[in-house]
Image (cartoon, rainbow, N blue to C red):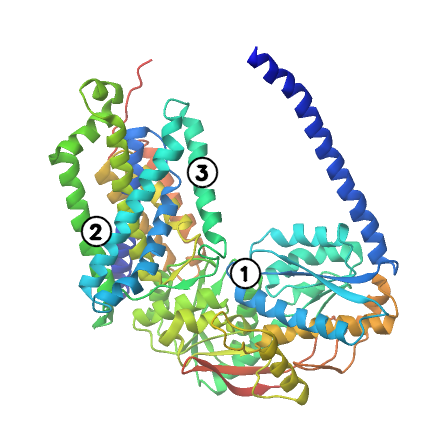
Amino acid sequence: MRQNIVRKWRFIVLPTLMSGLILGFTGCNKSGDSGGSGGGASGGAVIKFGEFASLTGKEANFGTASHEGTLMAVEEINAAGGLLGKKVELLTEDDLSKAGEPATIVTKLISRDGVVAILGEVASSRSLEAAPICQENHIPMISPSSTNPKVTETGDYIFRVCFIDPFQGTVMANFATKTLKAKNVAIFTDVKSDYSKGLAKFFKEGFTAAGGKIAAELDYNGGDKDFKAELTAIKSANPDAIFVPGYYTDVALICIQAKQLGITVPLFGGDGWEGEELVKIGQDAVEGDYFSTHYAPEVATERSKNFVAAYQKRWKNTDGTPKVANAMAALGYDSAMILAQAIKTAGTTDGPKVRAALASTKDFDGVTGKITINEKRDATKSAVIIQVKNGKFNYLETVNP
Amino acid sequence: MDWFLQQLINGFALGSIYALIALGYTMVYGVLRFINFAHSDVLMLGAFGAYFLAPVVGRFLPHESYIGATVVIVLTCAICACIGMLIELLAYRPLRRRPKLTVLITAIGVSLLIENVCQHEKVFGAETKPFPHLFPERDFQIGGLSVNTGDMVVLGVTALLLGGLWYIVQRTKTGTAMRAVAFNDSAAALMGINVNRIISFTFGLGSALAAVAGVFYAMRSRGIEPLMGIQPGLRAFIAAVVGGIGNLPGAALGGLVLALLETFAGGIPGLSNYRDGIAFAVLILILLFKPAGLLGKSQVEKV
C-alpha cells in the first residue's frame, strides 16, 4: 500500500517538477533576450559593462588587481553622473584562471545579460578564447593587459590598452645585451600559454639580432611543480642569464628550484611576473631578478599619483594595510575609462558606433600614460623595467617604443 | 657527467615520492580491486596539513629543526590516515557489494568533491601558497653537483618507510590478515579475520604514506594548492600499473622507473616539451611486452 502511494506521488511530483523546470528555463531565456535588446539599444535603465577576470586560481592576483582597477573606474564614472545620463553597471564573472571558462562566461554576459562591451582578460590565452565571441556578436572587447599580438588580430572589435609582446620582447632583448651584458641566454617557456610562447619567440628574435646566442631552450607546462630536470639541463648549458616568460606562480617556484640547483645567474621575464605572490612564494630566491611591465608607481604623472592614492584608500590587503596599485590594476582602470570615453564620443551604446569611437582614440590621458590606439587596435606605449630588491618591486628604467 | 649524476639525483628524489604514492594505490587495489582516485587528494591534504601544523608545532619546538619536522610529519600522517579511513567508511563501504564500476565512479566523485571544496576561499583557496621550511635545508655543491639535504632526507625516509611497510605486510599478524583479505576476502572472513577492520587499516596505511609523499612533494617544489595532487597522483597510479598493480615492490620500482624516464626526457633541450610523451611511450612499450607489469604475475581467471 505504502509503495503504491509513493508510486502515485511520483507520477504527480515528477511531471510537475519537470514542467516547472522547463518553464523556469524558458522564462530565463526570455528575460535574458529582452535584457539583451534593451542593453544593446539605448532602452535599458543602466548601461552594462561585462567583465571576465581570473578572480580565483593560478592568476588570481592579476585578475583581482585588474578587477579592482576596473571597478574603481566604473565607480568614478557613476560618481561623475554616469554615461549618457545613465548609471553604469559592471557585471563581473570569475573564470577560475581556467581554459574553457571564458567562452561560457562571455557568451552568457552577451546573450543573457546584454552587456554593451566586454572588458578582460589579463592572460592572452583566455582573451583569445573570448575574442571570437565578441567579434561575432559585434560587441567591442577591450583587453586591459593581454600582450600577445594574436588577441587583437581576431577582428576589428577587439582592442587593448597595453603594449604587445614584439615590443616587450625587444625591450628585454636590449636589456639583456646592454644592462645585463649577457651573451648566452637560456629561455624557459611555458608551452601551455600563448603569452609565454609569443614573448619567448620575440625575445629570441630580438636577442639573436643583437648578436646574442641562445644557450638552451627548454619548456615547461604551466602549473607544473617540479622543474628540476629542465633547470639541470639549463645549468649545464652555462648561460649568463635565464629568460623565463611565465606567470608569477610558476616563476616563483622556478626561481626557488634554480637556486637549490646552485644556479646563480639572474633570471628575468615579462609583465607576467608582477604579482605579489612572486615575492611571497619566491622570497629570497627572486631577489635581484628583473622583469618588464607597463607602469611603475614611482614614475608618476599627476594622474597616476591620484590613481595610486585613490586605490590605496579604496582597497585593503587582508591584513588591513593599504594595497599598492600594480600595473594590472592601472590597466584595468584605463580599459574601463577608455570604453566610457568612446561611448560618450559615440553618443550611443550601439556596438559598431562604439567600435568606431574606440578605434579613433588618440592621446587618451590614462593612468599608465598617453594611450593612442593604432591601426592594429593596440596601444602604443612605453615599458618600464623593474628589479626585485628587498622583497619590493624597484623601478629601474623606462623604455620608449 | 655532472649533468647525468644531477639528473639521477633529481630522478631518484622524485621517484621516491611517486613510489610512496603508488604504494597506496596498489595496496587498496590489492584488498578491494578498485582504484582509489581520491588518493591523490589525500596527498594534497597531507601537504596542507603540514602547512597549517608547522607554525603550531614551531611554537613548542625549535623552528626548522629535524625534531619539529618529525612531529609535523607524524601528526600529518595521523590526520591523513583518519581522512583515508573516513573516506572508505562513508563512500566505499556502503558500496562494498555493488559492482566495482560503481565504486570506481564514486572514487572519482570523492576526488572531485575534495578538490573543489578545498578550492573554496573559506577552505584553502585556489591560489598557490608558499610551503614553509620544515627543517634546515642546505645545498651542498660537490664539484658541479648540487645536493640538497631535502633530497637526501626524502631518499632516506622513503627507504625506511619501504622497509617498514615490508615488515608490516610480511611479518606482522595484521599484514598476514591483509594478504589473506587480498587473496580471498570471504575465505579470510571465515577464518575469523575482521575484513572491515583490515580494509580500514589498509586505507589508513596508504593515506599515511600519501601524506608523507605530499609533504615531500611540497618541500621540493615549495608551492602548494588544492589541485597539486592530480599530476603526481596520476603518475603514481601509472607507476603502480607499470610495476604490476597489487604488487608492493612493483609499485616502488614503477615509481622510480617513471620518474627517471621523465627526468631524463625533461632534460633534453628542445624535447622537454614532450617529456610526458616520451616517458609514457616507453611505459606503453613495457606494458606491451609485460602486460601484468614489471613484477606482476599474470593471473588466469577461472570461469
Parent chain of label 2: B
Q: Is residue A105 visible?
A: yes
Q: Position of residue A151 (x, y in %)?
A: 67, 63
Same chain letter for marks 2 and 1: no
Quadrant of the snapshot with the N terminus of chain B: bottom left
Q: Position of residue A232 (x, y in %)?
A: 33, 65
**Residue that label 1 marks:** A193
Q: Is residue B78 left or right of residue B279?
A: left
**Residue that label 2 marks:** B158
Query: Which amino acid type is marked by label 2?
Result: Thr
For marks 3 and 2 on the same chain, the one whose residue lies earlier in the sequence: 3
Disc 2 to disc 1, how far (Cα)? 35 Å
Quadrant of the snapshot with the C terminus of chain B: top left
Residue at horizontal 41%, vertical 53%?
A: B228
- Name above or below for residue A303 compared with residue A24: below
Q: Secondary structure at mark 1?
A: loop
**Residue that label 3 marks:** B108
- Name above or below for residue B33 compared with residue A300: above
Parent chain of label 1: A
Same chain letter for marks 3 and 2: yes
Disc 1 to disc 3, how far (Cα)? 28 Å
Q: On the image, which quarter does residue A41 sit in?
A: bottom right
Between B75 and A40, the one lying in front of the other is B75
